[in-house]
Amino acid sequence: MKFMKQRSIALSIFVALFSTHTLADTLDFTTLSQGPQGSTVLVFPQATITSFGADFYIGASGIASEICPLTTGSNCQADMQVDFTSAVNSLSFVLAGYDAGDHLDINIFSGATLLGTIASEANGLVDLSAYSNITKLYFGDSSTGAGFSYDKFQFTVATVPEADSYGMLLAGLGLLGFATRRKQR
């Protein structure tokens, strides 16, 4: 019986020390004014987005939350990169392509490691939940049509408890051990 209690307490300590929490998050472009942004780099708390074209345009099809990397010809054909502040999981976003001939390669990275590439030529939800610890997306647009815009980036971020949380946990476990020993005597 005593061994079972000790094993249970040890398992609880292990789980508490090495567990992480996840937070759902979204890249929200509605905080930006509609129209040209006058910049090829947009910084958000969750990510930095870089256009390898002339500018970013918000609301390309009249939807305030769509982001479009513009070329000099005012099409949404520029390549784009999203660098997440922290590794993300359960990532999805909406892809909007407008014309026949639109083609996009989405390269998915964890650090410097390429996890995979997905090709797309259509509108719709892109679900990358099969990939974990994503730190970067690179969108290679080789469209001959109007190109793509992006919307509703949703994901979870794994968070590790703060050091003071560990201290409080260990203090609580120490008190629990003290109380258990005292009760056994």
Image (cartoon, helix red, strand yellow):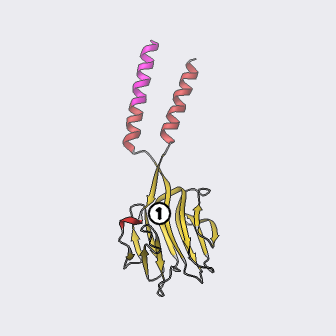
Q: Position of residue 96 (x, y in %)?
A: 54, 71
The one nearer the camera, 123 or 134, is: 123
Q: Where is residue 71 in the image (x, y as percent from the top left)?
A: 48, 84
The question of residue 178 being in magenta is answered with yes
According to the picture, the residue beneath numbered tag 1 turns out to be 84
Relative depth, front residue between 157 and 103: 103
Looking at this view, name the residue that lies furthest to the top. 185
Residue 95 shown left or right of residue 84 in the figure: right
Dominant secondary-structure state across the stretch colored magenta: helix
Q: Dot 1, how many residues are within 10 Å of its Cα: few (below 14), some (14-19), or many (20+)?
A: some
Q: Nearer the viewer, residue 109 or 13?
A: 109
Q: Residue at the front extreme? A: 62
**Residue 82 locus on image (x, y percent):** 49, 68
Whether 146 is drawn above or below 114: the answer is below
Q: Does the magenta stretch include residue 168?
A: no
Q: In this view, does 31 lie to the left or right of 92?
A: left
In the image, what residue occupies the spot 36% across and 65% down?
A: 31
Residue 133, compared with residue 123, is above or below; it is above
Q: Which of 159 and 51 is in front in this view?
A: 51
Task: Please report the residue visible at 36 percent of the width from the left and 41 percent of the height from the top.
Answer: 164
Image quadrant containing the N terminus? top right
Q: What is the magenta range?
A: 172-185
Hey, what amino acid is under mark 1?
A: Phe
